[in-house]
Structures are given as C-alpha cells and as structure tokens.
Image (spheres, rainbow, N blue to C red):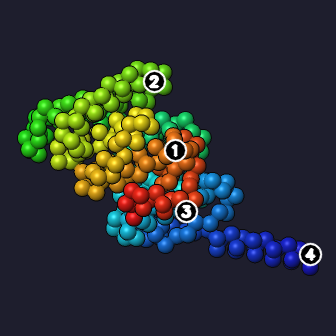
Amino acid sequence: MRNYLLILSVLLFLSTKAQNTSVFTYENFEQQVLEHNPKNHSNISKKDFNLVNRIFDETKSETKNNYKNFNVGDYFNILEAFILLKENKANMKIAFEKFLNAEGSCEYVIDYENTIRTKSKYNSIKKRFLKRYEKCNNSSSNKNVFDIRKYCKINKLDFELVKKINQINVTDLKYRKNKGLNAQQQNLDKKNQKLIDSLYGKYNSYIGKSLVGDKFQTVMWQVIQHSNIEMMSEYLPIIQTATREKEIGIVPLKMLIDRFYGLKYGYQIFGTQTGFGFELVDDNKRREIKLKYGIE
C-alpha cells in the first residue's frame, strides 16, 4: 500500500510539473510568446522575475500583440527572459534559433559577445553563441569597404556631414570593448560629445534619418548614451522629439531613459540596461515616466 501511494505521489508530481511547463514550437513561437504568462517555477529571485515580466510586457507592447511584428530585438529579449526563467533545453533551443535566424542577428551577436563570454548566467547558450560570433565576425571582416560617396549619392545626403558622422561612429566604438583601454575611449568620447554639440548647434535638430540616412541614424544617440548625466538630461527631450518624428526608433529612447534614470536615481523603467545593477521601478512610477515621454 505504501509503495502504491509513493508511486501515485510521484506520478502526480510529474503530471503537475508537466502541466506547469509551457511547450513552445518554432512555427508558432511568436503567438505563444504573446499569449504566455510567465510563472516562477525555478525559484528565481523576485528581481529577476520582475524583469522577466517586464520583458514580456514590453514585447507585447512593442509588437502591438501581432506576431508578424517581431524583430531581432524582440527575439533577443525573449531569449534573455528564458535564460532568467531557466527554461528547459527544448524551449531555450527554439528561442535561440529564432534569434539567430532573425534579420540583423549578427549585429547583436557581435555587440554582446563580451557580455555572453564573461557572464556565467549565459553558460547555457555560450558555446553556440560564440560559435556564431566567429562566423558573424569573419563575415563582417570580409565585407567590402563601405563607399560613403555612393551611399550619399543614392540617398541624396550631404557627403561632408555623413563623412563626419561616420568618423564619430568609428571612434565611438574604437576601444569600447577593450577594458584595458577605458581611458583612451573616454578621451574619444569627450571629443565626440563636443562634435555632437557642434553639429546640433549647426543643424538645430537631431542628426537622424533625414540628414544621414538609416545607416547612421543612431550615431548621435550612441554618443549621448555613452556620455554623462548632464548631457543625457540635455538631449533626452531632443531624442524624444526625434523618435516622434521617426528620425530614430523607439528602442534607443528607452535605452537612454533607462541609462539616465539608472545613473541618476539607481532605477530603470524598461529593463534595457542589464549588468548595471539598476532596480526596476514599480508599475505606478513606470506609467508616470512612460506618460512623461509619450511612450505607449
């Protein structure tokens, strides 16, 4: 009788566990994500679980609850949420494949290579991620030299302005990933900040799509994102206006808001600044800040 009860208990436990484990498929992944309500089955911290819920909420908001609107950023964020949730291998594999197969994934792989390589929480995907990094990095190195004149001619842009923005972009990234050269990068950052101030003074607007095209629309934002609280505070309204006028996407604005509030107050709103130790605000404060910057 005791053995029977023991077996029954085990079966009941396994059945309950199976019911609590969501099964994602590659074909319906996006719709399943939109319908999914995360549950904390792995006893992760309250902080991490709040971030998971924030990621899912933001994904549903950004895609307008339409599975057709998913992009590489959404896939990367859901992958991050799955890692925090300690999802099973099957679900993790599907989320990772969705990210890798999305347009623009190589840019993310190259940008986040050092983070994935050095942080233990990414151990479950590290090997495959770094393998893809080698492929993306080699592909990037083998590309033809970018022809600025041709780019400007095709898009009817000011060659001298695009040339200057391109140089700012190069120096903004020059030593960014090399921790041993922080001082050198900071010197370049200060020079770039002065150049951006000068360009804004000349054009009296954000240097975005209209002036430098899609390829360089985020360069001015990059410099501000890598600056200081004072510069961020000064340019936040300008980035907000640029977002409203479609000169730059909404994601950079969210990242700047998170970086600014994180550095000034120690908390973030959208959860974009992982690795800084910024806490997530409560729902009331989040609604207040989203309303302030006109974010739905």
For marks 4 and 3 on the same chain, the one whose residue lies earlier in the sequence: 4
Mark before the other along the chain sequence, 4 or 1: 4
Residue to which mark 4 is pinned? 2
C-alpha span from label 2 to label 4: 66 Å
In the rendered image, the quadrant that contains the N terminus is bottom right
Q: Nearer the viewer, mark 2 or mark 4?
A: 2
Kindly identify which residue carries mark 2: 182
Q: Are marks 3 and 2 in contact (CB under 8 Å)?
A: no
Above-or-below relation of 107 to 50: above
Amino acid type at mark 4: Arg
Residue 201 percent location from the top left of the image: 22, 36
* Residue located farthest toward the right when viewing the structure as drawn: 1
Residue at left 46%, top 43%? 260
> Which amino acid does the dot numbered 3 rest on?
Asp
Q: Secondary structure at mark 2?
A: helix
- Expressed as whole percent of the image width and height from the top left, the position of residue 167 reads 24, 29
Mark carried by residue 283: 3
Amino acid on which disc 1 is placed: Gly
Q: Residues within 10 Å of mark 1 (few under 14, many from 20)?
A: many
Q: In the displayed structure, does residue 242 sit left or right of residue 39?
A: left
